[in-house]
Each structure stands twice: as structure tokens, then as C-alpha cells.
């Protein structure tokens, strides 16, 4: 029997970006805020210091900062005719664990999603008509427009000290920025990072092709920065150990130094680590959350009563907790009814490996997690989709993340994987190979969803989350068309050889792709097609809010952290200014 | 750490042939000679006089592998990454030691793997589905490999085959032509290849990439550096410094 603890006003599950933002914003109310984080406390000192943090085996290969699959995993199948089997080790995506969550080991690519991404249904119908939408695609608007969210995007950019170049400042298009972006009221707080040679080549080639290259907005600070909360950032030194690592110089924005110290200084906020929330407990009618049950690091369980519960775990953890707790109706793909677990999405990758002439020196080890040039000419609705035969688009980019030698070993297709010939090709191409990649959007489909697994349980006795997911023709077509664009850019760079990487045949849980899982508890204005309203509030249990990429009705081609942060500020604002004054369903 | 520290090394290598530089702390010459005498296994000749030179010895003090397994690991690594005119061989940079330590530690014991049943084969897209930890997979996989070689090559274990036959065996395993008795040969090979590459390219602190020889070969400057100025000033210019490892800077 779980020990019942002293009630608090607000309990927050998870201490990554969203949990940290909610805790900070809601603590202003003076109410008692308790943050429960399943993992350990960690900080730049002593956990992320150089040179020890620069260990590719420990962090990139053994995933030391990430979710431990022996405790937290899910089961997976491509379709409902298969039996889902557990993801026995991390692969396709790398969720966080511990204070800061994945915000510690992200790349720092911080986007405002395009206005199209927030209302793809309305805009697709307006431009192409209903015939353009495949039969099983659940295309949905957010219920919040880009313009409504704009001030909150801005807030998150300032919190993180984003380095970038505006392309649409109060309606004025600016060359060198992203001219396709939604109207922004303010420029980025910091100028862009210094581009690598690879980025420069990409910029020239795409300009020659009539595209519009711009630097990726980066949470790796291009200069020393102090944010509005007076948190000081270091300057990125392009060490090339960024994504999958903690930053030793606090140049990469992370909740552990931008938010946690502020929370620790507040008398009404408590952070409890090693506290894994197992379930949200509802009242008898199932309409109100009373408490959460959590296990401490020793596995002893406690019941923590609270008036308000914010689920701020990773995308998949949020949906899992909702299903385990009976918050909202579980989705049933047969009937198409129910909402929790509906519209699970991912992203799709394709592109080109570009081998340049001998004696080209790209120095691939000079890099940063968000150092890349990008074009948005084939993204959102920035081009004519009718001709192409798909909806959505791609973020086409040339990355310079660092040339860590286990992970960065490009060789021409057809090279053996070992032996002398292999070694010769690795050495020959290490300094003169770049990538032109497409990270493509993935729409939601009726038969891609999350539910509870009937066969497998976690060490706490709970059913695993079950993922049923595969790529659909719309996305594969997109990935193939945009792979051709990537090849064209590679050729324009003046390559000796370009290898095309087309669409994957099936989704596989094994190779790393992106940690951009989305959906499962999507937001919207219709309770029949969304689990939470536009303030991230459960339609069914109004004192539960669910934050994070679980709220995205479909996935953009862009990295999710920007809108994840913006939505957290947006929802926290609604709670602070409206919900707390008059608790109940926000309309 | 510095290559000058191990003076006996050059003599040792000469005595043992290319494939011999296995142990992290190198044995003195006399022990090395003793090791040759102990290695009483037969060795196929590949007809190029390489037989004796390619002879392998167990690690000085493996943490996980027994001596039979150690022989196999050394020969496997030597086949996957031979010493050649391109750069260092996998054995001389210590990959067997890297793999041995990995198997003795948390990774080998599957500490971060979900290993609860029921177990089923699944589809390739569903990934690894064996009930085995990596260390268990090596143990069974090496036994399978040696038994398979013994059947196909007149009683010889893998490490007793000629270099060309070792290559042939691994090519056949890689292309799916070989069935092992206990574990899927392809899954074993994939893990072996992954760990071999980790040992070759990872920081020397883990036991491989000795003297940062691999980093020197590809021109990776190692860890602890920053490129805040050079990312611009070295655009399309060769940048090279002697690589630094974690221990160099600790």
C-alpha cells in the first residue's frame, strides 16, 4: 500500500523542457509545485565536464544520459497483423532520462514550425481540395494558429538564446534568413553560428539552383548570452560533441541550467528525483485527478495528492500514463473512435551522400548540434504539391554536427563493411564527404497508433506501451522526390560522386532516425478527434494537462522542441491567468 | 599512454608478427616467447608463408573471455581490420581488449536491455529479440563459430585457419550462407562488427585505439578541442594536430 503524502497544489511529471517551463511559470502563482522526475539529478558540474564528456562510446553508443530500456521501453510492430515485440535496446529514437530530460542531449535545432504546419487541413483543402488527402490520413488543424503562438515562440527563443537570422521580420522578407517562415515580431536574440565549409558549399549551390538557404536556428549560442531570467550562457566552441552529449560550457540551452536553478531557489517549488510516476489516480467518476502514484529509486511507492496534474514526460510516456490511468477514451483503429493513442507520427529520412574531390578539406570534426544550412523551398506548402502527388514536405539540410569517428564514416555505396578496402575508403573520404539530407514530415493515419501491450510488462508490472506504425505511400513519395532534390544539390556542389538514399521501404525500430516522435494525445477543438483541447487540457479530466510533442496532430519536417516549448508557455499562461482563477474546462 | 612508455613493444611485435599486440600492458619479451610456445594449436598455411606470422595468443589477462574464446576474438578482429598499408590493424590497437572489457561490464551484461520474455523471432524491423545478453551471445557465437569451422575445415578452430580462409568464413557469415547451431550467425556477426568498430574508433580509455593510432590515421584531432576560430580560418584547409584523448587531458 502506497504511503499517502502531504497534498500539494500542482504536481508535474517529468523535468525536461516542458516540466521545467510549467514549474517556473506556475510557481509565480505562489501555489505549491512539486516536480517528480524519474531519473537522477545532474548538472554541468560535475556531470558534463570536458574531456570526460567527449566520450563517443559512453554517451553516443552506450546512451548513458538516455532512457534505460531495461526499465522503460515499448513494444513495436509495423501493423496489426503482427505481434508486437519489445524494443529490447534503444535504436530508432533516444528519449531522455533524468533532470533536463532529452533537453540535455539534444542538438539544439529550435524551429518555429511553418504557419502551414499549424493548420494543414484548412490550407490543403483551400489550395488542392479534398481529393489531395489520402483516404486513411487523419489530417487535422491544431486549433491554434501560428500567429496566436508567435509570442510564445518568441519567449522560448529568448529563454534558449537562439542564434539565427530572421527571414520574415514583421512582414519584411530578409535575404539570408528563412523567407518562408511565419511573420516574427522580433529577430533572434543572437546572430547565427559561423558556418562550416560544408555549409558554405551548400549555400552557394542552392543559391545557384534558385533556392533560399539560411542557417538553422540554433540553441548552441553563437556568443556569450544572458537570457531574460539572467541565466548566463557560454559561447559554443564547435567541439563537435553536442547531440547525445551534455554541453560542458553551457553554450547549448538545456533545462538543467536555464530552469532548474531558478526552481531550486523558489520556496514553493520542490524537485523530487528518482520519482517514477506509475499512474494518475482519478476519482470514482473518472472526471477528476486526485493524486499520482510514484515509485522512488528503491521501488517503494507513494501516493502524492494534488489539485492539478501536468503530464510533462516524453511524448510516449505521456500517452502511456494516460492509457494506464484511464484519462480520455483509448483509440480504437477498427472503429476509428477514441482519442488517446490516436495520430502517433514520426519523421522520414532520405537524402544524398556527397563525395567531393580529393584534397577538399571539410574538417568534419568542427561542428555543433545545430550547425547546418537549410532550405525550406520544399517544405510545408512552399511548392506545388499537386504536381508531386504528396502532402507535406521536407527540411533539406547540410549538417556539420561533428566528425566523431565511430558515427561519421561515410564510404561510397557498395564498399565492403570491413577489411583493407573498407579501411582505405574510410580514410579516403573522411575529410571530403558531406550530407545533403531530407528530414520529412509524416502525417497521421488511421492504423498508426499507440495502445497498451497485451503481452509485455515493465519491471513495475505495468503493460508496455505498444506502437503500431509504418510509413505510408504519401511519405515515401515525399522522401523519394526530395532525395532527388538532395542529389541535385550534391551535384551542383561539384561532387566527384553522389549516392542517393531513397525512402525506406518500412519503418524499423533499429537504426537511429530521429527522436521526433509525436502524437498520441493530440490537441484540437473537437473532443472526438483530440485528447486535449487547445490549452493542452484533457477534455475528460479537466485538472490534467498534457504537454509535449504528444500534442502534435501530425508531424512536421522540423525538429519539435521549438513548438514544444512554445506550447508549454502558451498552456502555462492559460493555466496561470484563467484556470487557476476558475478551475474547469477552458473554452 | 605515450608510445615511448612501452619500449619492449617494437621487439614484441617483431617476435609475434602483426597480429600479436593484444594486451593492454605488454608482456616482456620472455613472456611473449613463452606465449608462442604455449600456443600449440595447428595453423593452416595460406601458401604465402603467413601461417606462423599470423599466429595469435590469448590476452594477457582477459576479464571475460576464456583462452579459447580469446584466440577466436583476436583472429576475428585481425580478419575484420588487418594491419595493412592503409593503417593499423585492429589487434595492434587493442580491440580484443576493448571487446573483452565491454563484455565484462554493463554493456556485455545487458544492463540497459529489456530482457523479459516471452521471446519470439519477430521481423527484421522489430530488431534484436534474443534472450541473450551481448556477453552470452559472444560465448555461444564463438563456440558455434569454432564448431562450424571444425566441421568445414578439418577440425580447425577459426583462429587456426589461414587468413584467406578466415576472410572467406566471415564473408559467408555476412552474406547469410552460414547457419550456427545455437545463435543466429548474422546477429552475432553484426554485434562483433559493431564492437570491433567501437574499439577501433573510440577513445583509448576503453582499451582500443591504442596510441590514438586510428585517429591519427583518419586525421581526427581527438577530444577537448574547440574550433571557434578555425572553423572559419580553416575552410578547405587541412587542419591537423596530434590527437588528444581523454587521458591525455585528465
Image (spheres, coloured by chain):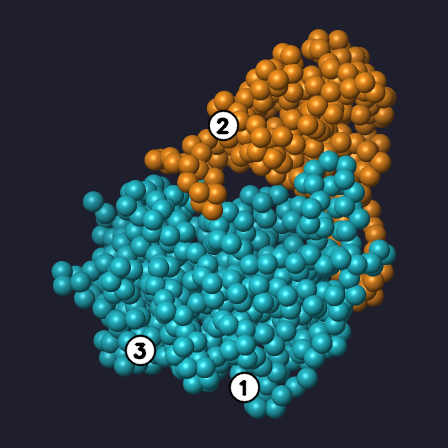
Chain colours: A cyan, B orange
* Relative image position of residue A576 (x, y in whole percent): 34, 77
Asked if residue B5 can be seen in this view, the reply is yes
In this rendering, the count of numbered labels is 3
> Of residues B14 and B40, which is closer to you in this image?
B40
Mark 2, other Cα within 10 Å: few <14 / some 14–19 / many ≥20: some
Numbered disc 1: what chain? A
Label 1 to label 2, Cα distance in Å? 58 Å
Q: Where the N terminus of chain B falls, by quadrant?
A: top right
- Picture layout, residue B20 above or below residue A403: above
Given this view, does label 2 or label 3 mark the residue nearer the observer? 2
Residue A218 location, quadrant: bottom right
Q: Are the residues flagged by discs 2 and 3 in contact, CB closer than 8 Å?
A: no
Subunit of label 2: B
Q: Residue A482, position in %: x, y?
A: 60, 67
- Label 3: state its secondary structure: loop
Q: Which mark is residue B183?
A: 2
Secondary structure beneath label 1: loop
**Viewer-nearest of labels 1 and 2?**
2
Q: Secondary structure at mark 2?
A: loop
Residue annotated with mark 3: A525
Q: Which residue is mark 1?
A: A183
Q: Is residue A287 left or right of residue A550?
A: left
At 61% across and 77% down in the image, what residue appears? Answer: A377
Amino acid at each position: 500500500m502506497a504511503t499517502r503524502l502531504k497534498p500539494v497544489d500542482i504536481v508535474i511529471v517529468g523535468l525536461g523542457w516542458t516540466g521545467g517551463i510549467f514549474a517556473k511559470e506556475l510557481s509565480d502563482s505562489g501555489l505549491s509545485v512539486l516536480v517528480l522526475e524519474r531519473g537522477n539529478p545532474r548538472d554541468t558540474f560535475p556531470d558534463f565536464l570536458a574531456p570526460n564528456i567527449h566520450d563517443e562510446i559512453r554517451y553516443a553508443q552506450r546512451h548513458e544520459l538516455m532512457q534505460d530500456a531495461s526499465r522503460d521501453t515499448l513494444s513495436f510492430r509495423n501493423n496489426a497483423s503482427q505481434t508486437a515485440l519489445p524494443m529490447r535496446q534503444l535504436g530508432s529514437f533516444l528519449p531522455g532520462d533524468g533532470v533536463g530530460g532529452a533537453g540535455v542531449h539534444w542538438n539544439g535545432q529550435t524551429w518555429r514550425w511553418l504557419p502551414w504546419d499549424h493548420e494543414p487541413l484548412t490550407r490543403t483543402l483551400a489550395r488542392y481540395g479534398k481529393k489531395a488527402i489520402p483516404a486513411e490520413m487523419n489530417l487535422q488543424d491544431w486549433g491554434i494558429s501560428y500567429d496566436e503562438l508567435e509570442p510564445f515562440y518568441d519567449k522560448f527563443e529568448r529563454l534558449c538564446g537562439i542564434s539565427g537570422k530572421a527571414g520574415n521580420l514583421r512582414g519584411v522578407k530578409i535575404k539570408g534568413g528563412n523567407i518562408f517562415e511565419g511573420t516574427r515580431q522580433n529577430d533572434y536574440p543572437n546572430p547565427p553560428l559561423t558556418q562550416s565549409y560544408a555549409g558554405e558549399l551548400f549555400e552557394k549551390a542552392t543559391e545557384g539552383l534558385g533556392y533560399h538557404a539560411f542557417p538553422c536556428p540554433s540553441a548552441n549560442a553563437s556568443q556569450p548570452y544572458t537570457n531574460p531570467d539572467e541565466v548566463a550562457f557560454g559561447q559554443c566552441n564547435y567541439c563537435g560533441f553536442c547531440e547525445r552529449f551534455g554541453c560542458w560550457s553551457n553554450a547549448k540551452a538545456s533545462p538543467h541550467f536555464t530552469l532548474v536553478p531558478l526552481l531550486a531557489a523558489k520556496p514553493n517549488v520542490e524537485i523530487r528525483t528518482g520519482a517514477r510516476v506509475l499512474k494518475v489516480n482519478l476519482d470514482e467518476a473518472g472526471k477528476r485527478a486526485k493524486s499520482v502514484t510514484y515509485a522512488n529509486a528503491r521501488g517503494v511507492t507513494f501516493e502524492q495528492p494534488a489539485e492539478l496534474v501536468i503530464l510533462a514526460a516524453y511524448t510516449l510516456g505521456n500517452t502511456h500514463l494516460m492509457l494506464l490511468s484511464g484519462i480520455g477514451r483509448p483509440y480504437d483503429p477498427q472503429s476509428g473512435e477514441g482519442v488517446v493513442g490516436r495520430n502517433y507520427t514520426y519523421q522520414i529520412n532520405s537524402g544524398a551522400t556527397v563525395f567531393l574531390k580529393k584534397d577538399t578539406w571539410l574538417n568534419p570534426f568542427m561542428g555543433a548540434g545545430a550547425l547546418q544550412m537549410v532550405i525550406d523551398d520544399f517544405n510545408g506548402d512552399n511548392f506545388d504539391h499537386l504536381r508531386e502527388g504528396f502532402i507535406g514536405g521536407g527540411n533539406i539540410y547540410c549538417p556539420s554536427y561533428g566528425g566523431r569517428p565511430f558515427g561519421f564514416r561515410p564510404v561510397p555505396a557498395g564498399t565492403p563493411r570491413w577489411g583493407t578496402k573498407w579501411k582505405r575508403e574510410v580514410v579516403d573520404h573522411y575529410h571530403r564527404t558531406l550530407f545533403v539530407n531530407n528530414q520529412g514530415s509524416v502525417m497521421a493515419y488511421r492504423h498508426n497508433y499507440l495502445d497498451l501491450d497485451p503481452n509485455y510488462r515493465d519491471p513495475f508490472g505495468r503493460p508496455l506501451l505498444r506502437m503500431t506504425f509504418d510509413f505510408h505511400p504519401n511519405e515515401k513519395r515525399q522522401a523519394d522526390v526530395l532525395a532527388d532534390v538532395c542529389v541535385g544539390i550534391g551535384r551542383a556542389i561539384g561532387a566527384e560522386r553522389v549516392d542517393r538514399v531513397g525512402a525506406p521501404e518500412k519503418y524499423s525500430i533499429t537504426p537511429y532516425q530521429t527522436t521526433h516522435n509525436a502524437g498520441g494525445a493530440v490537441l484540437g477543438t473537437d473532443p472526438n478527434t483530440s485528447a486535449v483541447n487547445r490549452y493542452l487540457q484533457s477534455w475528460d479530466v479537466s485538472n490534467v494537462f498534457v504537454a509535449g510533442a504528444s500534442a502534435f496532430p501530425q508531424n512536421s519536417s522540423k525538429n519539435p522542441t521549438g513548438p514544444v516549448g512554445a506550447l508549454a508557455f502558451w498552456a502555462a499562461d492559460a493555466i496561470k491567468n484563467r484556470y487557476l482563477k476558475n478551475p474547469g474546462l477552458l473554452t | 599512454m605515450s608510445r615511448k612508455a612501452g619500449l619492449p613493444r617494437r621487439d614484441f611485435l617483431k617476435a609475434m608478427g602483426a597480429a600479436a599486440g593484444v594486451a593492454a600492458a605488454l608482456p616482456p619479451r620472455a613472456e611473449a616467447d613463452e606465449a608462442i610456445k604455449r600456443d600449440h594449436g595447428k595453423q593452416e598455411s595460406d601458401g604465402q608463408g603467413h601461417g606462423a606470422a599470423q599466429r595469435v595468443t590469448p590476452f594477457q589477462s582477459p576479464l571475460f573471455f576464456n583462452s579459447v574464446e580469446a584466440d577466436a576474438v583476436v583472429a576475428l578482429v585481425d580478419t575484420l581490420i588487418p594491419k595493412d598499408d592503409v593503417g593499423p590493424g585492429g589487434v595492434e590497437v587493442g580491440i580484443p581488449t576493448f571487446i573483452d572489457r565491454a563484455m565484462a561490464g554493463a554493456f556485455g551484461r545487458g544492463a540497459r536491455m529489456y530482457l523479459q520474455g516471452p521471446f519470439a523471432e519477430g521481423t527484421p524491423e522489430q530488431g534484436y529479440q534474443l534472450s541473450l545478453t551481448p556477453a552470452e551471445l559472444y560465448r555461444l557465437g564463438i563456440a558455434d563459430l569454432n564448431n562450424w569451422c571444425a566441421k568445414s575445415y578439418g577440425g580447425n578452430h577459426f583462429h587456426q585457419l589461414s587468413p584467406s580462409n578466415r576472410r572467406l568464413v566471415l564473408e559467408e557469415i555476412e552474406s547469410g550462407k552460414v547457419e550456427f547451431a545455437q545463435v543466429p550467425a548474422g546477429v552475432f556477426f553484426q554485434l562483433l562488427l559493431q564492437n570491433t568498430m567501437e574499439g577501433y574508433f573510440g577513445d583509448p580509455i576503453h582499451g582500443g585505439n591504442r596510441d590514438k593510432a586510428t585517429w591519427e590515421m583518419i586525421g581526427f584531432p581527438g577530444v577537448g578541442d574547440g574550433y571557434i576560430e578555425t572553423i572559419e580560418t580553416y575552410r578547405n584547409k587541412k587542419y591537423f594536430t596530434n590527437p588528444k584523448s581523454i587521458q591525455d587531458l585528465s
